[in-house]
Amino acid sequence: MRWSVVLAGLLGALGVGIGAFAAHGLEKNLLSQSLPLEEVADRLRQCDTAVRYHMIHVLALLAIGLTAPRASMCLRGAITLFLLGIALFSGGLYSMVFLGEMGHWAIVPAGGMCLILGWLCTVGLAWDSVTQ
């Protein structure tokens, strides 16, 4: 599953880029849009949450991609769910931060559920290696 390592690298670079923009330019950008200060503060917090979850799950993708002894259903499930979780959870929050809307209200919670299920697949992956 080395392709997951490639995806982790690309998503990691994207996360660092978004995090850097959030730290050095996002507030000024939001203020230039004449948004109320409370909304600017909310969007900054949402971006921080999105980047944090994004990067934590990039590290999870990297770890399982580098250490999984063999391809398995649990490995594929964890990778797929982590990718979906990053896209839906962090992507939904990024959409709110940068576009002011996230689409359907269930995008972020659905992404969170994908991340939870990805961790449970990781447990299954570990269990498989212990029982083999």
Image (cartoon, helix red, strand yellow):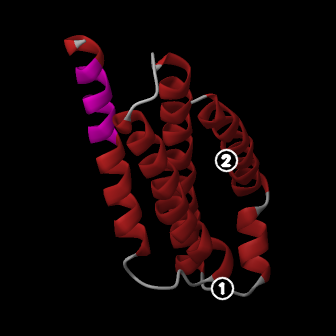
Mark 2: few, some, or many residues within 10 Å (few <14, many ≥20)?
A: many
The residue that mark 1 highlights is 35
Expressed as whole percent of the image width and height from the top left, the position of residue 87 reads 55, 60
The residue positioned 57% from the left and 51% from the top of the image is 51
The residue positioned 30% from the left and 49% from the top of the image is 117
Which SS class for mark 2?
Answer: helix
Tell me which label, 1 or 2, sits earlier in the chain. Answer: 2
Task: State if disc 2 and disc 1 touch (CB < 8 Å).
Answer: no
The residue positioned 78% from the left and 72% from the top of the image is 29
Q: State which quarter of the image contains the N terminus.
A: top right
Span highlighted in magenta in the image: 119-128
Label number found at residue 77: none
The residue positioned 49% from the left and 65% from the top of the image is 88
The residue that mark 2 highlights is 15
Q: Is residue 68 above or below residue 36?
A: above
Is 122 within the magenta? yes
Which SS class for mark 1?
Answer: loop
| Amino acid on which disc 2 is placed | Gly
Determine which quarter of the picture holds residue 114. bottom left
Determine which quarter of the picture holds residue 72. top left
Expressed as whole percent of the image width and height from the top left, the position of residue 106 reads 37, 77
| Amino acid on which disc 1 is placed | Leu
